[in-house]
Image (cartoon, rainbow, N blue to C red):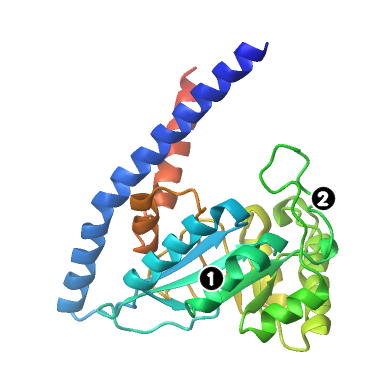
Amino acid sequence: MHSDFHQVSFYQRLTDNCSRLLKVVIAFLYLPFDSVRCILLRLLGYPVSARFVALMYHSVKSDEREQFTHQMDLLVRLANPVSGDFAGRNDCRSQNFVAVTFDDAYQSVLENALPILLEKKIPVTLFVPTNSLGTRPGWITNERHRDAAERLLTSDELRFVQQTGGLIGSHSVTHRPLTELSRPEALAELTESRQVLEKILGRNVDSFALPYGAANADVLRLAAKAGYQRVYLSEPVNSRAGIDGPVYGRIGVSPSDWALEYRLKVLGAYQWLPVGIAIKRRIVNVLRKAA
């Protein structure tokens, strides 16, 4: 059984790496296409916003500080770091704008990421599930998950992050996917988490990151009803700032990302991903029906 487990792990890693490599290749091809598209639109007189990319981290372990530092050095060279409430600029010739966001507000972010971000003057945005402040993430049931032993920040620590210039947004109350809840439950997750954070921080909280990126039209309407001005997904939707109104995409990143992989993500080359996912789903559905 031990041998079988390692064999499965090997094939899983191989599959994952092949998938990552394919995405890198597609992203590498997409980037010049998007640049040419921007130039053509400008020549035709159409307004094109500057490229805006939101990076979605979760944690930075102590042994990942060096990798994270290299990533932030690269980010500063390639883009203009901005906060998660960036309003956008209508000029596609401008430098790329990139926001560094963290879901779940883990202690490792405060200990290992924040000092680096402050040193390099990179704004940070944290999205917090309020029911787990100061405790471990109860939604993670797999003990082997990389963040299973993490602790969420306390109220005092959130205030400290805000005092250093960090932006705090909501990540619901219990970190449940809102699409699986009733409308009253989903609205409660949206409103109560916002109220808790506003009481802690003494300021308006109008940004929300969807747990697991789970969203539909009804959830987005409820988010607007709860008073959120900006809602973040967990996948890209468009690389141009302001083009999607209150709904913004993000691309998942990790300190373990390959250097080229990370560079392409910062440059907005993964904005093709939702289209790729939709095509993949259609192919899978066709194959299932054929079987």
Q: Work out whether 257 lies above or below 52.
A: above
x and y, in percent, of residue 8 in the image = 57, 20
Q: Residue at x 74, y 75 (%)?
A: 158
Residue 210 appears in which quarter of the rendering?
A: bottom right
Residue 78 appears in which quarter of the rendering?
A: bottom left
Q: Secondary structure at mark 1?
A: helix
Residue 123 in view: no
x and y, in percent, of residue 250 in the image = 50, 61
Q: Residue at x 39, y 32 (%)?
A: 18
Q: Earlier in the sequence, mark 1 or mark 2?
A: 1
Judged by depth in the image, the label closer to the viewer, 1 or 2, is 1
Q: Work out whether 146 lies above or below 200.
A: above
Q: Secondary structure at mark 2?
A: loop
Name the residue type under label 1.
Ile
Look at mark 2 in the image and give the residue it sits on: 138
Residue 137 in view: yes
Residue in the foreground of this view, choosing between 57 and 176: 57
Task: Identify the image quadrant of the N terminus.
Answer: top right
Look at mark 1 in the image and give the residue it sits on: 116
Q: Residue at x 34, y 56 (%)?
A: 264
